[in-house]
Amino acid sequence: MSHLSVAKFGGTSVANHAAMTACAKIIIADPNTRVVVLSASAGVTNLLVALANGVEAEERRKLVGEVRSIQENILNELKDDSCVRPIIEKYIENIEYLSEAASLATSAALTDELISHGEMMSTQIFIEILREQNTTATWLDVRDIVATNSHFGKAAPNDEQTQANSDRVLKPLIDRGELIITQGFIGREPSGKTTTLGRGGSDYSAALLAEVLNAKDVLIWTDVAGIYTTDPRIVPTAQRIDTMSFAEAAEMATFGAKVLHPATLLPAVRSNIPVYVGSSKAPQDGGTWVTRDPQPRPTFRAIALRRDQTLLTLSSLSMLHAQGFLANVFSILAKHKISVDTITTSEISVALTLDKTGSTSSGTELLSGELLEALREYCTVKVDTGLALVALIGNDLHIAAGVAKRIFDTLEPYSVRMISYGASTNNICMLVQSEYADEVVRSLHKSLFE
Ligand code: ADP
Ligand code: ASP
Ligand code: MG
């Protein structure tokens, strides 16, 4: 294991000149941080996604104008913008051109090409921010390293190819002592087109690079000083968790704790690389270490919330005493690349939840007409939306005495649409109406953590 750390800074951390300067100071203060992965400046990816969905000329001008003004606000504060301003102008021209193409015909590949510009611009500007702090850094196009398949919008990395690229291109730069600034979120597929790893994917990029570099840790610098017992935006009194296990953090990320992208823990677990989460605005406040086997392992660890859930209820009388119904349903879902989260069954029906949040970079509809049609050939299909999944994360929840009573007592005033309990030792999930999701989180947090 080397002494190298890979640091990642998220969108709010690179939102403006002051935020970027704070990041630069964190990097300079830690000589082990040799590879830096950046997100796009806050707001830019959302604007680019809107453009990629194809909009009329007037709206296009407005949205491109907003992208430009986010970047120009930073450029205007640079002491010397002469090198980087023309580079950013070129990217903006490219954004205009690609947006016009998207207004004629959208495509997943075009979307990824367009939205990759956010990370390209933030990393170019960041080189100048470091220069202002008397630090020279090397800008690297991460697409030369992160190889993926062609699943645009949510591409899967090709680990061997990524390792080979890193050995060939990245390692020699690091061995020469260079400080590398590169993009999160994006990669390149075999034919050379740009891909993205799904919304929030920069955390995943950082973990992937840490793995191929055999780094000692991944440092995720964000806008909160660690991982809390629940989203501090919902419960301001949530407490910071100082150390937690990979398994706990993975459950939290999977069930909606946006602070880490769900795939981040894959390389970390595989290669046993500790992950640190801290605040780029207040690095002195400390943060959370996620490691393989920290102690203690409390029964209740945290509460996560995932909004925008869809419940599919599939019923068929022919399911009675029959075999193969679930197999059929799952094969249809698999064919449409739908992953099922929680599921409950009865004799003649099965209810399952699908995650709509952050599924692909473009946020396209999950439930296509084709999928519903295929399902309706087998059974009646009911689709419920406006739901949220509240997940209680912990350890040995399935065998701990009294857990159900404490949860059900707290949930008494609310109507709970579905509960998943017992499949996992690490979580209990409850599906509730969106409008009281926050309230359910606050009540559960109060009774289990305060
Ligand atoms: P970045 O842009 O740095 O990637 P994100 O917005 O993706 O940052 O993630 C940070 C946000 O995650 C926080 O502002 C917070 O609202 C949210 N969050 C959700 N659950 C948690 C949690 N359990 N602990 C800390 N933050 C959480
Ligand atoms: N910029 C990308 C997004 O907003 C990736 C990231 O921030 O992690 O989803
Ligand atoms: Mg994020």
Image (cartoon, rainbow, N blue to C red):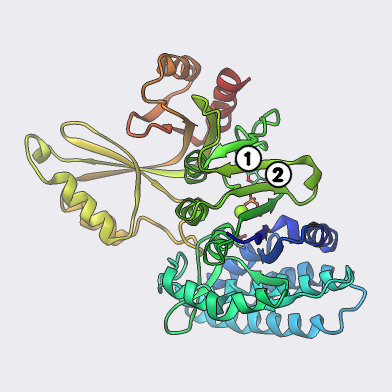
Numbered circle sitting on residue 224: 2
Q: Quarter-wise, where is residue 57 in the image?
A: bottom right
Where is mark 1, residue-wise? 227
Provide residue 321's location: percent of width, then percent of height.
6, 35
> Can see residue 56?
no
Tell me the quarter of the picture where residue 123 sits.
bottom right
Mark 1 residue's CB less than 8 Å from ligand 1? yes
Label 2 beta carbon less than 8 Å to ligand 1 = yes
Q: Quarter for ligand 3? A: bottom right
CA neighbours of label 1 inside 10 A, class few (<14), some (14 to 19), many (20+): many
Pointer 1 with pointer 2, Cβ within 8 A? yes
- Residue 404 visible? The answer is yes
Q: Position of residue 67 (x, y in %)?
A: 71, 70
Amino acid type, label 1:
Ile
Callout 1: helix, strand or loop? loop
The residue depicted at 38 percent of the width and 31 percent of the height is 425
Q: Residue furthest right?
A: 79
